[in-house]
Each structure stands twice: as structure tokens, then as C-alpha cells.
Image (cartoon, grey):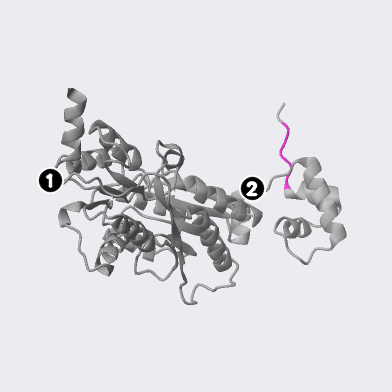
Amino acid sequence: MIKKKPTIRDIAHAASVSVGTVSRVLNEHKSVSPENRQRVEAVIRKFGYRPHPIAQSMRTNSTKMIGGLVRNLTFPMMAGFINSAEPILSKAGYVLVFANGNDSVAHELMIIEMFLRRRMDGLLVTLCDEGAPELRKALKAVNVPMILLDRELDLDTDTVWIDHRGGSALATDYLLELGHRRIALLAGNRAVRPARETEAGFRGAYAARGLAPEEWLIVHSDFIATSAYRNTADLLAREEPPSAIIIGGTMMLPGVLHAINEAGLRIPEDISIINGCDSDLAEFATPPITVIRKDFAGMGTVATQLLLERLGEAQPKKSKPRRIILPTELIVRRSCAAPAAVAGKNPATRRTAVRRR
């Protein structure tokens, strides 16, 4: 026999209070006396009562849910973001619901619509393409507090950025200081801010020394490992290949290492590399890879705090949007050295020839 689920009236009767008092306890209203609150909470625990979420949200005009849209949940940095954001929201009484945009404008549009239909109280959003007009239109129609993550859009909303430009400049200047001049940049897709800022930092470091990179050294593609492998292999096959590579995306490193190994090159004797973010692979590779460290966990903390302030009306929606830029740093390991003095020769060809003897 299935037991009947207790109702709010059952709780009120057992606690000898009114239905209104139970409702105010459930909604954390401060007008309830401590004695009544303790009595009602004890009965709720005894009965195992759970208020109906839809009915409760209609009464309070709040679902206590936050929607998180990210372009790809497989990126390792998302773990740091989620692990920092979720506890803060949970402590404030909110549930974080993440959805994977899967690098698709159509899919991201569907997720935004779903979040709004489910009446999310706020949104944490990043996108695969800042230039997509349909995405901009959809986000402009959002009527709940929203924090934009590492994207640059003309929206009246708070934004948290990573200083990709500064990190790229640090990495490029470090390689230039070692004597490299043919430095390749795998910059990712210009449709998103990180790729554009990474290129700007790269060019800026050259310009600060009165130099300019050769344009063929700047490669824009997507951020996945297979593309990084193909692009790196193409660069290394040139008559005068780069002596160093800066990897702009978070998922590119395996592809770059594969291409370098396949070409028979040694790191850093034949080629130097710097990865665009830190990871277990970068830290424990042989040799360990120099990286641009980016604080994605910090982004989760800051973005969540900004959102909670908007939800709590500490910063009303009509107040001036805030922009927070999180710093980056260069972590020097053993993957960089002065360029090999093999003038006019392709190290890839040289190493392959040696291997075949």
C-alpha cells in the first residue's frame, strides 16, 4: 500500500500552527517566532515533507536554480570553474544546472530558451560564437541577472574576463628573450574573445621589441587536439619551421605533442613550446611544459559572487555593469630553451633523416 504524501495542511495540524505559518517557515520568512519555527521544522523532518517545487516557485517567484551554459564541458578548466561556483551557490540555497553548448549556435539557442522556460533565477553564460546575431538577440531578451564568462558582447550585464592578452604577451616575450624569432601561435577561433586577445598579446610583445611576426606563423583554427596536430605538422614541414610554438587553446596540447614526436623533434633542444593553460598533461609531460596559468576556479568564484549580489539586489539590475579581469601568470618549466643553431635547415627533416639511417 502506497502511503499518502503529507500535505502542508498535515504539517500545520501536527505542529498546531496555521497553514500560513508553515508556508512562512518554508519560505524562510523572518516573521515566524523561533518557537514556532523549531516546532514546524521538527514536524517537517518527522514527516519527511518536501514542498512541491513548482507550486513553491509560483508562490515565491523563485525556482532557486541557476543555469550555466558553457561551450564545451569536456574542457579540463570547467572542473575548476564548477568546483568553485557550486559550493557558493549551494550555500546560498541555489542549485546549479549546467548545460553543454557543444560548440553549436543552434544548441546554445535551445539551451537559453530552455533555461528561461524553466524559470532559472540567474544565468552564467559563455558562447561558441560572439558574432552570431541570433545569440546576441536571445541574450538581450534575458530578463534575469546574467554573468557573461570570458566573452565580449554589447550587453548590459556583468562580465568576468581572463587576461589572455597579458598571458600571451608574457609567453611571447619570454621566448623572444631566449632568442626565438620564428614563434608560431596556435590561436584558436577569432569568433571568441580569448583567441583575439591571445593574438593581440602575441603581436604586442613583438612590437615592444620593434619586431613583427611573420603572418604565416599565426594560425587560427578551432581549439581541438586533432586540428592542433594537423596545424603543427604543417608548420613543422616548412623549409624554415618555427623554433617555438605558443598553444592558445586548452585542449590543443596532445595534438601538438603528437606532431612534434612524429617529426622526430626533441623538446626543448629542437623546438620550444608553451601551453595556453595548465593541466596534468603539461605538468607531468617529459619534459614538463611551461604554461600560461589562468584562474578558471577564480572565475567561478567571482562570477557566482557577482550573480548572487544581483539576485540579492545589492547591485540592482539597472546599476552600471561591472567588468572583472582576472590576471594570468607564466609558469616556467623545462620545455623552452634558446633556438637550435641549425641555420637554413629544417630540424624535422634532419631528425627524420637520422632516424632512418
Disc number for residue 211: none
Label 2 secondary element = loop
Question: Mark 1 highlights which residue?
Answer: 344
Question: Mark 2 highlights which residue?
Answer: 52
Q: From the top left corner, tell me how far across and down residue 14 is, in percent.
A: 84, 47
Residue 43: tell me if it is visible.
yes
Farthest residue, direction bottom? 319
What kind of secondary structure does the magenta stretch mostly adopt?
loop
Q: In this view, does 43 lie above or below 308?
A: above
Q: From the top left corner, tell me how far across and down residue 237 is, in percent.
A: 15, 39
Q: Is residue 30 above or below residue 250?
A: below
Q: Give the range drawn in magenta.
A: 3-7
Binning the other alpha carbons within 10 Å of mark 1 as few (below 14), some (14 to 19) or many (20 upward) gives few
Label 1 secondary element = loop
Q: Gap between marks 2 and 1, in whole Å?
A: 74 Å
Q: In this view, does 198 lie to the left or right of 213?
A: right
Q: Which amino acid does label 2 sit on?
A: His
Give the foreground label among 2 and 1.
Answer: 1
Q: From the top left corner, tell me how far across and down residue 196 is, in percent.
A: 29, 60
